[in-house]
């Protein structure tokens, strides 16, 4: 019996646990509905009162069973004497009650008091932590883990706050009790807490010089206390906040965006080129890389932290719904290592898409950067639609510029944005099948002024002879200062 109860409350995935969660969801929904009905100006009477009290009782029973069936880890690990076992049974359950998830349940059970009925809405957080909204890392689990791993820091902070409040309350009570400003120790503790936290309600005010001096000391102490809390929270919860931001993008419904995988600080110039290339396009660009966002990344680019070589993390960047993907090689490693990571990323992306049930209108277009020319064929076999050999391309331009001075500058301008560049486009609508390349080139030159340089099809041809037949379905390679022909 105890084993079944333990499974029902502490073993997700079991049938008993699922039944308990579903029952809790139903109770929460009915409870929130009753509160809403009452807030709307309707009084609970008759059967509704009975249902309301029964739900609160069930919440209390569920909480007692959850705490009672909890098994402290020390009991499973240590060989304890009976007194030690009793100690760990009690202390372990007390610590379990202080965990964030259990505190939520305790707070909502406190709604048995009529003045605290609205607290049952807090139990909606139970739904959020149970439902599969957070596929990769639940922020509720992240907050809980951060609190557990940094328990000593939080004990230090709350301990310092407690000592300050208690000492301040006792001191101000002794200083002001004869003046009538503070009539009880409880008032002194309340005034101390309000002062240290810089809330300052003003309902209690010291009137004696000593009391005002004590108040000044507590105000200054409060500044340091708040700074201490801010530092601890900022240090311990930052990773959880970043996880929430990643999940927010995954759940944002973003589509038709561009994903850049493997970005690092050495790829900064790529962002400048992307900014110019898509200046007139509102397409979202997502940088998907390990580590935190670099301060050098412009605000217009989204950042999602993850590892593109792991299928389990690719959906963080919603790559199934992206228009295109660029895989950039890391700069801080040898070329062969960078290319190996690029090829692994390509395999992972293609496998992930192939195993998905999402049906795309057009395949994801993937462009990969390769540093070693020997790995180009491997990158294509891994699924790259286009491979850019950045190292070989740069060295070829350098060598040719020496052999033929001036060509390096010309090629640099051709490859730059906001200058004449290469484009692919469909032939004019009134093109007659069977026309030669020379006829098509002349027609395009006459209408658009673009310089047609070749044929892009099953067999790419640069500068073919004028009498070369133009294949049906092929596209033109042309140079212009902007796209002047439709892409398809």
Image (cartoon, rainbow, N blue to C red):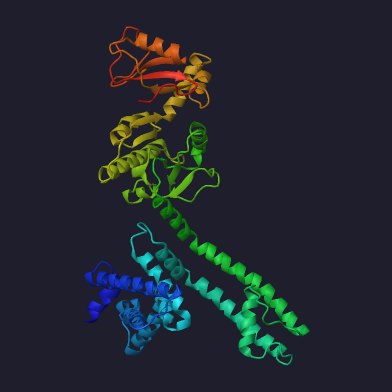
Nearest the viewer among 87 and 179 is 179
The residue at the point 27 percent across, 77 percent down is 6
Q: Quadrant of residue 391?
A: top left
Residue 231 screen position, x and y as percent: 57, 65
The residue at the point 64 percent across, 81 percent down is 192
Q: Is residue 294 above or below residue 409?
A: below
Residue 118 appears in the figure: yes
Q: Quadrant of residue 324?
A: top left
Q: Quadrant of the C terminus?
A: top left
**The residue positioned farthest toward the top in the image shown:** 467
Residue 98 appears in the figure: no
Residue 200 screen position, x and y as percent: 66, 75
Residue 208 screen position, x and y as percent: 76, 85
Q: Is residue 372 above or below residue 433?
A: below
Q: Horizontally, is 349 left or right of 175 in the view?
A: left
Q: Horizontally, is 273 left or right of 316 in the view?
A: right
Nearest the viewer among 263 and 330 is 263
Q: Horizontally, is 156 left or right of 8 in the view?
A: right
Q: Is residue 98 above or below residue 470?
A: below
Nearest the viewer among 9 and 230 is 9
């Amino acid at each position: 019996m105890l084993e079944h109860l333990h499974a029902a409350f502490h073993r997700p995935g079991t049938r008993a646990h699922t039944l308990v969660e579903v029952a809790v969801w139903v109770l929460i929904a009915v409870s929130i509905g009753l509160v809403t009905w009452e807030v709307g100006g309707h009084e609970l009477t008759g059967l509704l009162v009975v249902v309301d009290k029964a739900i609160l009782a069930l919440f209390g029973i569920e909480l007692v069973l959850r705490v009672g069936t909890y098994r402290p880890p020390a009991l499973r690990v240590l060989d304890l004497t009976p007194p030690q076992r009793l100690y760990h049974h009690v202390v372990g359950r007390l610590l379990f009650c202080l965990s964030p998830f259990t505190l939520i349940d305790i707070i909502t059970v406190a709604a048995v008091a009529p003045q605290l009925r609205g607290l049952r809405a807090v139990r909606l957080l139970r739904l959020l932590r149970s439902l599969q909204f957070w596929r990769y890392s639940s922020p509720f689990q992240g907050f809980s883990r951060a609190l557990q791993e940094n328990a000593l820091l939080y004990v230090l902070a709350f301990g310092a706050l407690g000592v300050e409040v208690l000492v301040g309350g006792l001191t101000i009570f002794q200083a002001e009790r004869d003046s009538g400003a503070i009539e009880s120790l409880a008032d002194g503790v309340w005034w101390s807490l309000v002062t240290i936290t810089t809330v300052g309600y003003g309902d209690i005010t010291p009137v004696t010089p000593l009391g005002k001096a004590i108040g000044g000391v507590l105000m200054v102490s409060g500044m340091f206390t708040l700074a201490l809390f801010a530092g601890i929270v900022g240090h311990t919860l930052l990773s959880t906040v970043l996880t929430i931001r990643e999940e927010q993008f995954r759940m944002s419904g973003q589509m038709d965006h561009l994903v850049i995988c493997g970005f690092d600080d050495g790829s900064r110039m790529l962002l400048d080129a992307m900014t110019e290339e898509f200046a007139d396009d509102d397409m979202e660009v997502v940088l998907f890389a390990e580590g935190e966002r670099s301060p050098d990344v412009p605000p217009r680019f989204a950042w999602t932290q993850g590892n593109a070589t792991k299928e389990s993390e690719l959906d963080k960047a919603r790559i199934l719904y992206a228009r295109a993907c660029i895989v950039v090689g890391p700069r801080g490693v040898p070329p062969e290592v960078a290319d190996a990571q690029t090829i692994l990323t390509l395999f992972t992306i293609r496998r992930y898409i192939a195993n998905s049930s999402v049906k795309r209108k057009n395949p994801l277009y993937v462009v990969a950067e390769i540093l070693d020319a020997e790995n180009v064929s491997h990158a294509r076999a891994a699924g790259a639609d286009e491979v850019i050999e950045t190292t070989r391309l740069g060295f070829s331009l350098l060598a040719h510029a020496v052999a033929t001075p001036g060509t390096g500058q010309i090629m640099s301008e051709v490859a730059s944005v906001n200058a004449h560049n290469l484009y692919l486009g469909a032939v004019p609508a009134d093109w007659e099948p069977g026309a030669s390349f020379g006829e098509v080139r002349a027609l395009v030159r006459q209408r658009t002024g673009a310089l047609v340089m070749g044929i892009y099809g099953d067999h790419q041809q640069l500068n073919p002879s004028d009498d070369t037949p133009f294949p049906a379905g092929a596209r033109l390679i042309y140079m212009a200062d902007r796209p002047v022909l439709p892409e398809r």
